[in-house]
Image (spheres, helix red, strand yellow):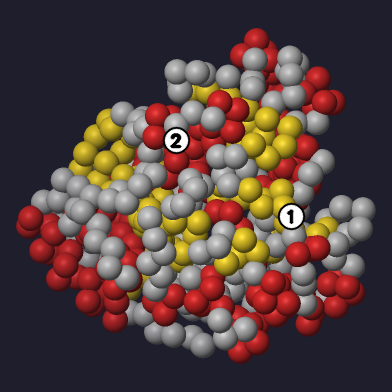
Amino acid sequence: MYLGIDLGTSAVKTVLVDGAQRVIASESRPLTTVSPQSGYYEQDPAQWIDATFATLDALKASHAGELAAVEGIGLSGQMHGATLLDASLRPLRPCILWNDGRSAAECLILEQRWPALRATSGNKAMPGFTAPKLLWIATHEPDIFAAIKLVLLPKAYLRLVLSGEAIEDVSDASGSLWLDAARRDWSDAALAATGLSRDHMPRLVEGCAPATTLRAELARRWGMTRQPVIAGGAGDNPAGAVGIGAIGPGTAFISLGTSGALMAPTSRIAANPDRAVHTFCHAIPAMWIQAGAILSAASCLAWLARLFGVGEAELLAPLGARPQAPSPVSFLPYLAGERTPHDDPAVRGMLDGLSHGTDRGTIVQAVLEGVAFALADCREALADAGIAIAEADVIGGGSRSPFWLSVLANVLNVPVHRFVGGETGAAFGAARLGRLAVTGEAIAAVCTRPERIETFEPDAELVDTYAGRLPAWRELYRPRH
């Protein structure tokens, strides 16, 4: 038996997977985010631990026998967050999250200090990444910066609590800007540019490699017969790729979680930092992922549900299974700024084209289409790096909506597929990494494609109509630098 634990932004999801790769049970606990001011987003690391332990306690209550047999654990996590620990390995402040935009000025400083940043990391300095956050801390909270003993990404902090060791995998580390993406190792020059050294960093491992073991007292708490191996794991999107078997070139997938992304695994680095394409090491050795990332995806639908005071399912139900025509209203999904292709933390969302005849369904459809148009921008940025997208699999909570997937197929003009359990893809991928760390099996034998339950084909008429709408949608964007 294997466990996959996904430390997301909105929830911790834990899945229990058997040797036949069947999800035996799953548990989820919500997380809350605090925004001290506009563009700032933080979480208390203590709630990550509480939520994770709650999912495992629940699994013990419902599936004690299966949990007792767990041999390997894989961790997946929200990327880029700055979790700062003191000499006693206690958090010095709340974690600054991936969608936090406060360090825009520091990005410019970082690129000036280290001109080789883009060539070495494969990325442009953007506020979401970890390194600029540390420059912001050094300037605005110097006492905290001086007290830093260790800088961890969210899932590495969870691993520290579970195992007692500070270890990170190379896929998650890629999102820090401190990693030499080609060498898959920390860059001393990058660390020096932010006033840090390797002494502040966790040990690095590959995602499918054994990293450490669960603490003996925690294994006893959950009734486990042994101390399970904990794998290197992965950032949430690389873990999602492992979960759907996207482990080689020629595959592409869309993540519709809190944030969104269009990603393609590659056997070589195909960076395009000028268009804000992200370069990450894959959780699989000698592989990378090129990604266009948007800061708000399914969170746009959650925002709308809060605004109307109803559940997301109630918003989606009247739309049916397929769009008949584009919404007359346009939506920019920049509720927390944007990454690909604009790199603009200050831009905000917009509804355009409202009239007396606008109803709720019109707005809901516009929101789904706005996210799809933003992913079309990502596809164009990837194309500039030589990556063509012929079809795409979809994971994340948004993959539950047939209407949304149909919109994506027509906006991107490619077939779009969804899977059984696609909404828990990252946790399932983490469980696969936990298995690989224990068994040493061939990666391709474990990371197979799950069953596709539905394919959404583009409709030629709608493809043309959406293509005609895209230029006007792009014209709505105005930089707020």
Residue matched to label 2: 443
Q: Residue at x 44, y 35 (%)?
A: 443
Extreme residue toward the left, this view: 461
Q: CA distance from mark 2 to mark 1?
A: 25 Å
The type of residue carrying mark 2 is Ile
Q: Residue at x 50, y 56 (%)?
A: 281
Residue 129 appears in view: no
Decide: is 471 above or below 221: below
Image coordinates for residue 359, horizontal then vertical, percent? 30, 58
Extreme residue toward the top, this view: 65
**Nearer to me, 317 or 204:** 204
Q: Quadrant of residue 331?
A: bottom left
Horizontal arrangement in the rendering, residue 467 relative to residue 225 (left or right): left
Image coordinates for residue 425, horizontal then vertical, percent? 45, 38
Q: Tell me the crowding category of disc 1: few under 14, some 14 to 19, or many 20 or more residues within 10 angstroms, Cα based.
A: many
Decide: is 272 above or below 262: below
Q: Residue at x 45, y 32 (%)?
A: 442
Q: Residue at x 44, y 75 (%)?
A: 273
Image coordinates for residue 413, horizontal then vertical, percent? 18, 57
Q: Quadrant of the N terminus?
A: top right
Whichever of labels 2 and 1 marks the residue nearer the N terminus, that label is: 1
Residue matched to label 1: 202
Number of numbered discs visible in the structure rendering: 2
Q: Secondary structure at mark 2?
A: helix
**Nearer to me, 218 or 409:** 218
**Nearer to me, 203 or 172:** 203
The type of residue carrying mark 1 is Pro
Q: Quadrant of residue 162?
A: top right
Q: Tell me the crowding category of disc 2: few under 14, some 14 to 19, or many 20 or more residues within 10 angstroms, Cα based.
A: some
Horizontal arrangement in the rendering, residue 370 relative to residue 121 (left or right): left
